[in-house]
């Protein structure tokens, strides 16, 4: 079993840089004289700028603790935050916020760079295989790390099954379509099934027990809880290498917590806050953030008489926050169809896949 350490990301995470991966060696197996050397090596393998480095004149250890308690575990996370966000932390004044942001910006380069540099950074992005060759081809390798991918569609179109498959494939070596990282699963509908992970692990020759140990699971019970889980996620990602964060589904609880047009504005504001927090996790830790979404039927002029009248819920909040949007629908027989609904780098197109006992696979005849 491996301990998989976090990767550096560029400013606002255009790409995930090279991933460090070291084997976990039980302390009991280490000769005592080598123990200190191993600890020094492990420390060197941690590439994040941990927030403790901000301690100095005007920034006390107690201030750093307050930052960590609110989900800011790295200097990158602090630097990407707004002054307004940091000012909401109890016990940190506006003056202290200015000092913290000034110190954080000294550690990072957040100005202009060349397109050449961005191009080089994007070459280090990992793509998580979906399990289907045709689907991977459509996505140019699979689900991209360092960004948000939205998967929406009706029930029984394969959204949750794809999420389960990704929980396994993200643990694969990079040359096999993985990220050599752990997975995190936020379940809002109670559809997570660990036994599916064991079945999928067998397909890839992985130990089912190791795969389960490398998936961190949490059930969200309301939209506030769903948002607070991202604070916990930030702390975990700062300590260990995660390659994937799944929220299944991102919008389900909002449909029940907020009802009627009178609460629409409050719902969208809360949803925007959640999506922004999710975007920061992708930016700071370089993980692939995958959210599932539900659909509703269009009953207004936007519905086509002969076309598909389904649209994802969440409106422009979800649309603008998601980097890539994938629309799943039922195909012929047991096959499913994935359509590129929106993407900054993928051409419009469709691919077929099927749901098998071993996870997502190629379409059947």
Image: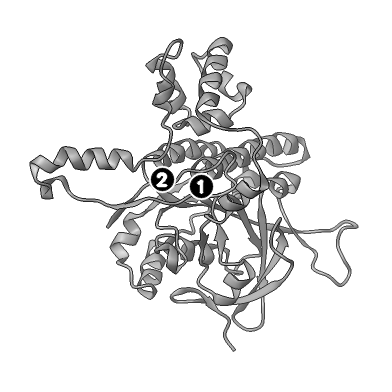
210, above or below 287, in the image: below
Give the image quarter of residue 63: top left
Q: Nearer the viewer, residue 104 or 301?
A: 104
Is residue 216 in view from this perspective? Answer: yes
Q: Position of residue 32 (x, y in %)?
A: 8, 41
The 10 Å Cα crowd at callout 2, few under 14, some 14 to 19, many 20 or more, is: many
Q: Nearer the viewer, residue 252 or 234?
A: 234
Write down the residue under mark 1.
286
Residue at 36 percent across and 40 percent down: it is 46
Q: Are marks 2 and 1 in contact (CB under 8 Å)?
A: yes
Q: Is residue 66 left or right of residue 321?
A: left
Q: Is residue 56 left or right of residue 206?
A: right
Residue at 55 percent across and 25 percent down: it is 105
Q: Position of residue 184 (x, y in %)?
A: 44, 50
Residue at 72 percent across and 71 percent down: it is 349
The 10 Å Cα crowd at callout 1, few under 14, some 14 to 19, many 20 or more, is: many
Q: Residue furthest left?
A: 32
Earlier along the polypeptide chain: callout 2 or callout 1? 2
Give the image quarter of residue 272: top right
At mark 2, the secondary structure is loop
Inter-mark Cα distance, 2 to 1: 8 Å
259, above or below 205, in the image: above
Q: Position of residue 49 (x, y in %)?
A: 43, 33
Write down the residue under mark 2.
6
Number of marks: 2
């Amino acid at each position: 079993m491996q301990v998989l350490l976090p990767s550096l990301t560029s400013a606002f995470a255009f790409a995930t840089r090279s991933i460090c991966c070291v084997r976990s060696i039980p302390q009991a197996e280490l000769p005592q004289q080598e123990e200190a050397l191993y600890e020094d090596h492990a420390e060197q393998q941690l590439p994040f700028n941990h927030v403790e480095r901000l301690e100095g004149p005007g920034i006390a250890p107690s201030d750093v603790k307050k930052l960590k308690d609110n989900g800011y575990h790295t200097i990158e996370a602090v630097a990407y935050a707004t002054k307004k966000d940091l000012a909401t932390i109890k016990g940190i004044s506006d003056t202290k916020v200015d000092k913290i942001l000034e110190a954080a910006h000294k550690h990072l380069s957040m100005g202009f760079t060349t397109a050449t540099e961005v191009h080089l950074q994007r070459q280090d992005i990992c793509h998580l295989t979906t399990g289907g060759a045709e689907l991977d081809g459509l996505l140019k390798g699979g689900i991209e790390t360092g960004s948000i991918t939205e998967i929406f569609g009706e029930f029984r179109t394969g959204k949750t099954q794809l999420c389960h498959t990704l929980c396994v494939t993200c643990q694969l070596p990079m040359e096999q379509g993985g990220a050599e990282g752990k997975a995190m699963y936020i379940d809002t509908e109670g559809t997570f099934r660990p036994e599916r992970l064991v079945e999928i692990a067998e397909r890839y020759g992985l130990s089912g027990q190791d795969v389960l140990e490398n998936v961190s699971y949490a059930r969200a019970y309301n939209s506030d809880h769903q948002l607070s889980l991202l604070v916990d996620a930030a702390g975990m990602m700062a300590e260990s290498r995660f390659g994937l964060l799944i929220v299944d589904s991102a919008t389900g609880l909002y449909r029940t917590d907020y009802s009627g047009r009178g609460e629409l504005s409050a719902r969208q504001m809360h949803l925007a806050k959640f999506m922004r927090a999710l975007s920061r996790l992708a930016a700071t830790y370089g993980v692939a953030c995958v959210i599932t979404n539900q659909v509703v039927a269009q009953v207004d002029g936007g519905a086509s008489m002969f076309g598909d009248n389904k649209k994802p819920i969440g409106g422009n909040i979800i649309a603008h926050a998601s980097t890539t949007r994938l629309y799943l629908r039922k195909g012929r027989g047991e096959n499913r169809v994935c359509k590129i609904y929106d993407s900054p780098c993928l051409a419009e197109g469709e691919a077929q896949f099927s749901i098998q006992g071993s996870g997502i696979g190629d379409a059947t005849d």
